[in-house]
Amino acid sequence: MMSEWHIRELKKHRLYKYLISFIIIAIATLIQKLLWPFLSPSSFVIFYPAIVIACFYGDGYSAIIMALISSQYFFIHPYGAFEVNFPKDVLRLTLFFISGAIVRTLVNKLILAKLESESAVESLQEEKEMRESFVSTLTHDLQTPLSALRISAEMLV
């Protein structure tokens, strides 16, 4: 059973992840706003890298939702409003959410693969150390009888 302290720490950790995601999406929104004259046909271009970064350091789904809200408010006509035109905007937002979820899944698989490879490397290093320890112990234990045999052979000669 988890103590109250553990639960508070988990909640703090989760809050930090949400805060990191919010900051990353806010920065992406500012960059998108600055580059808007050059990127105006696509309102989601800068948000994909931001979602990837948020998956590594923050929370992926909250970053996707924040990017959806930000893009709808700042970059989809009418600007500065949460007006959704059916079916065009709904399709656009749905496709962005699905593609963002796919990106999040791929990033999480990369993170898991990296962690698994790191644990595999650690287990190989442990196995190497055990082998070296076994060989050194075996070598040490065989030296005593071999020394006795060598001395006996020298005495016979």
Image: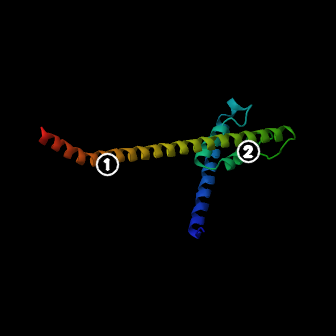
Residues at marks 2 and 1 touching, judged by CB atoms closer than 8 Å: no
Q: Position of residue 116 (x, y in %)?
A: 55, 44
Residue at x 28% of width, y 46% of height: 142
Q: Nearer the viewer, mark 2 or mark 1?
A: 1
- Is residue 27 visible in the rendered image? The answer is no
Q: Amino acid at mark 2?
A: Leu
Q: Is residue 46 left or right of residue 137?
A: right
Q: Nearer the viewer, residue 149 or 134?
A: 149
| Displayed quadrant of residue 88 | top right
Q: Residues within 10 Å of mark 1 (few under 14, many from 20)?
A: few
Residue at (19% x, 46% y) in the render: 148
> x and y percent of residue 124 in the render?
46, 43
Front-lying residue, 123 or 61: 123
Q: Quadrant of the C terminus?
A: top left
| Quadrant of the rendering where the N terminus is positioned | bottom right
The residue at the point 83 percent across, 44 percent down is 84
Q: Which residue is mark 1?
A: 137
Q: Secondary structure at mark 1?
A: helix
Any part of residue 13 in sight: yes
Nearest the viewer among 84 and 57 is 57
Q: Is 47 situated left or right of 81 in this image? A: left
Left/right of residue 154 with respect to residue 120 in the rendered view: left
Q: Which residue is mark 2?
A: 68
Which badge, 2 or 1, comes first in the chain's sequence?
2
